[in-house]
Image: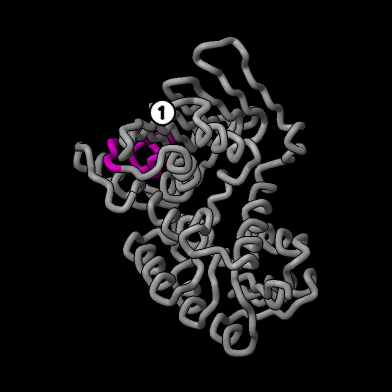
Amino acid sequence: MPLRVAVIGVGHIGSLHLEAYRTHPDVEIVAVCDLLKEKAEAAGRQYSTLAYHNVAALLAKEQFDAVSICTAGAQNGSHHFGPAMQCLAAGRHVLCEKPLSNQLVEARAMVAKAAQLGLYLGTDLNHRFTPQAEQAKEWLTAGRIGTPLLANVTLWIDNPSDKSPWFHIRALHPHSLDVMRYYLGKAEKVHAFFCRAPKADGPDGKRLCWSNVQVNVLFENGAIGHLTGSYDANSRLSLERTEVMGTEGRFVIDNCYEKLTLYPRRSDDLVVIPNALFGGVPNFEATISRRVHRWVDQLNAGAPRTEIEASGEDGLAVQEIIEAAILSWEEERVVDVENG
């Protein structure tokens, strides 16, 4: 029997979720929902499904197994909490866009609610779902780089939005910090520095948003991670780079999906895998499809809650790191991470 799904929020990201569900052979799209009636009805027509503009009505009238929460809001997350909690309370599994919420207390409540009810809660941390990231994880697990010591992750895009001071780190860097956690595990301590780019019409000649950040993370296993992030960079040629070094070598993922290279420490026998050998992931949007398909496959297989990849707990963990980074900058100190 196919997994019956709904999508709440049918903007750009919601449309990507819908397309991912449409292309999975074991999914039935039951309904879409958006506060804007015209958007909901347009998506309903496009995907030949029912359209709602009220979450309560959707839950009262339609039977489905799981839902994608793709609403937006402040820092791309403030509209997630309400519909997610409604759907969990109604017994639906939830795949939520990142961040789970722009408020840490709400993100914690979402994770607690899903655990209490024994429901699946996933986060769209799609950057870990590239074939390159998965192959690199296999190398790490197999000991190809030895004991992990260091990680460097760079993620930058040209985003002029000044919606709020913390928009950059809260909206963008769940991705980069999740990739770091994917390889190095649980975070323990954080130290961060921020800066704002010049802006002629800014309140003090600078951007409102803290648009550049460098974050150092100490992990429980003793490894050290470093993030460089920006909303002021030219990202046309490169958007994201991940490097993880261990006692026996290192691997580098260029631009998320373009090339993966293994550099053994004690030989010159590099392993270079271009994107084409992985089937040619065409763009970043395709990584969302890979993430959604994994969500469907795990639900259909009845995977244990503890094995859900990019789970709600993972989404919460990166938010804990982000809030610790903000506190580190504000109080000029190293901050312990709770549940990182």
| Residues drawn in magenta | 188-210
Is residue 74 rendered magenta in the image?
Answer: no
Q: Quadrant of residue 222?
A: top left
Q: Which residue is the site of mark 1? A: 147
Q: Position of residue 124 (x, y in %)?
A: 55, 55
Q: Quadrant of residue 226?
A: top left
Where, quadrant-wise, is the N terminus in this rendering?
bottom right
Q: What's the amino acid at mark 1? A: Thr
- The residue depicted at 44 percent of the width and 28 percent of the height is 152
Is residue 205 rendered magenta in the image?
Answer: yes
In the rendered image of this protein, does residue 1 appear above or below residue 153? below
In the rendered image of this protein, does residue 134 appear above or below residue 313? above
- Describe residue 170's horizontal placement relative to residue 127 as left or right: left
Residue 154 visible in the current orientation: yes
Residue 155 visible in the current orientation: no
Q: Total number of numbered labels?
A: 1
- The residue depicted at 60 percent of the width and 72 percent of the height is 66
Q: Position of residue 323 (x, y in %)?
A: 32, 49
Q: Position of residue 301 (x, y in %)?
A: 63, 65
Secondary structure mostly seen in magenta is loop
Mark 1 is surrounded, within 10 Å at the Cα level, by few (under 14), some (14 to 19) or many (20 or more) other residues, namely some
**Colour approach in the figure:** one colour
- Describe residue 39's horizontal placement relative to residue 243 as left or right: right
Disc 1 secondary structure class: loop
